[in-house]
Image (cartoon, rainbow, N blue to C red):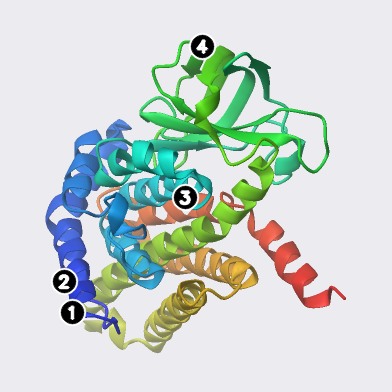
Amino acid sequence: MPVDRELPTAEARDLLALARDIAVTELAPRAAEFEERGEFPREVFRTLGRAGLLGLAYDEDYGGGGQPYEVYLQVLEELAAGWAAVALGVSVHTLTCYPVAAFGTDEQKQRFLPDMLGGELLGAYCLSEAAAGSDAGSLQARARRDGDSFVLEGTKAWVTHGGVADYYDIFCRTSDDAKRGISLLLADAATPGLLPQPPERKMGLRSSPTAQVVLDGARVDADRLIGAEGDGLRIALSALDGGRLGISAVAVGVAQAALDAATEFAKQRKQFGQRIADFQGVSFLIADMATGVEAARSLYLAAARRRDAGKPYGPQASMAKLFATDTAMRVTTDAVQVFGGYGYTRDFPVERYMREVKVMQIFEGTNQIQRMVIGRHLTRD
């Protein structure tokens, strides 16, 4: 059932209608098959790029859509209702464009952004390592200056699009300085010594490859340093606020799909001579699901509107990510319950929805980390 949205412009309404049409006709019919095979749908991202959906939040001067973040996020939500892995990919790609758009020089913006935003290239964000997940400042991959280039050594972990990306945002240590020891380099996928490993074997989102990336003497030109040397951690943390809102929208999209599926099933499934939707236990369950989805959507949109207004929004992004992903986990679990035994089979999509949203409570900062961020903001002097 289409969501009743309040959108700022007629153009935004057209974008949402386009996203919904793509989700219904192109994404949802293919999702289960690709997930079962663990196959990455590269051509889908080219289609989204040609439709202008891979650069919505960025400046039109560089090929972006020039849309407010609140519109971009609702497009993500619509895509997620059709195929979570694709919406996640759009969110991650948008995240990878942010450092160049926000911290790049004019020359770097003109050089890199048009292909990034136009959909010809797909990005990956290499921040985490095996021993540096929530504690991003402890990463150990290194970049050593050698003339007009940097030589990279180490291993990055949990890289979405690892092995299929065209470029990689690589955060690495350029000094031992505790606060300014990390820098960001933009590496082409064809760089010798940049070696994606086989994808992880995951519970869900199997059509979105997640892999380690080994850096074995990978040489990256110094003019691909984004921001100043030592600015990497500041750039990463700044980018993650927007990324958390992206994950919030994706989680809400999957939760909405689960709610719609459960509602339709409850109206059609009969037991004891009546629809199961007419039993109070089921109707109350669906009511709670709907309330959670609506609240999560309102929370991420409120944070996005603060971002669009140029106001600080980091704590609100953490609140949205925390609430939306916890809500999606509960809603998808309850959707399986509404389906009963059918919900535990792959004949219906709700079991896939439940597997997909679990990781959303973990990546882009675990929900325990979000609680720390929120708590520290509220209790600092």
Label 1 to label 4: alpha-carbon separation: 48 Å
- Relative depth, front residue between 137 and 296: 137
In this picture, residue 207 sits left or right of residue 288? left
In the picture, the quarter occupied by the N terminus is: bottom left
Q: Residue furthest front?
A: 106
Residue to which mark 3 is pinned: 98
* First of labels 1, 3 by sequence position: 1
Labelled disc at residue 193 = 4
According to the image, label 1 marks what residue?
10
Is the C-beta separation of discs 4 and 2 under 8 Å? Answer: no
Callout 1 touching callout 3 (CB < 8 Å):
no
Q: Which residue is mark 2?
A: 14
Structural crowding at the residue carrying mark 1, measured as other residues with C-alpha within 10 Å and reported as few (<14), some (14–19) or many (≥20): few
Whether label 2 touches label 1, CB < 8 Å = yes
Q: Amino acid at mark 3?
A: Tyr
Disc 3 packing (10 Å; few <14; some 14–19; many ≥20): many
Q: Amino acid at mark 2?
A: Asp
Whether 334 is drawn above or below 282: the answer is above
4 or 2: tag closer to the N-terminus:
2
Q: CA distance from mark 4 to mark 2?
A: 44 Å
Task: Tell me where residue 239 appears, x and y as whole percent.
Answer: 55, 53
Secondary element at tag 3:
helix
Name the residue: 17% across, 52% down.
51
Q: CA distance from mark 1 to mark 3?
A: 26 Å
Q: Residue 43 appears in which quarter of the rendering?
A: top left
* Of the image marks 2 and 3, the number of the one nearer the N terminus: 2
Look at the numbered disc 4 and give the secondary structure of its residue. loop
